[in-house]
Amino acid sequence: MQVIFIKDLKGQGKKGDIKEVSDGYAINYLIKKGYALKKTTGSLNRLKVEEAEALKQDNKNRDAALKLKDQLEKIILNFKVKTSKDSRMFGSISTKQIKEELGKLGFNVSKNQIENTTINSLGMHLVTITLYKDIKCTLKVHTEA
């Protein structure tokens, strides 16, 4: 029996794969547990529709990430920090603080998207933010006494 996987199943197939499996395995496990559908014209049409919707959503997310990238690369985040007499910072600027400052400016960026960098010196620093799968932007962060 040929089945279309609708969920990833380790060692068997990924979502969208069409595979030939034994009838008993297909009926008693794959279809019953919701991992696959029997290959029919209806299920093939459903698969095509889902792929088209996923592609449409992917393009929408990519466009939003590119727009956000253009906006983020134009700004500079300024942090005023306490320093010692020889101009060394007390503490550091963390990804959480960068996220909070971006939130104040109206940008919705998750802490996980910001590359894990701690800034512990004065001056201009570049921080990488992953906005989408392969879209990254460079944010300028300036620290001053």
Image: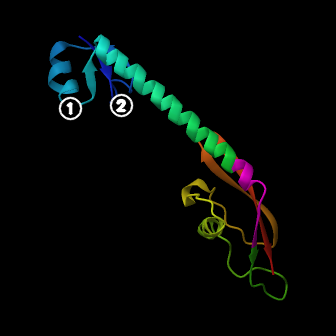
Q: Residues within 10 Å of mark 2 (few under 14, many from 20)?
A: some
Q: Position of residue 28 (x, y in %)?
A: 14, 24
Q: Residue under circle 1? A: 33
Q: Residue at x 62, y 57 (%)?
A: 114
Q: Taking 53 as reference, is 39 left or right?
A: left
The disc labelled 1 sits on which kind of residue? Lys
Which numbered dot is residue 8?
Answer: 2
Q: Residue at x 57, y 41 (%)?
A: 61
The disc labelled 2 sits on which kind of residue? Asp
Q: Is residue 109 above or below residue 45?
A: below
Which quadrant holds the C terminus?
bottom right
Q: Residue at x 74, y 49 (%)?
A: 70
Q: Residues within 10 Å of mark 1 (few under 14, many from 20)?
A: few
Does the rendering let one see residue 133?
A: no
Q: Magenta stretch: residue 111 in it?
A: no
Q: Position of residue 53 (x, y in %)?
A: 46, 29
Which numbered dot is residue 131?
Answer: none
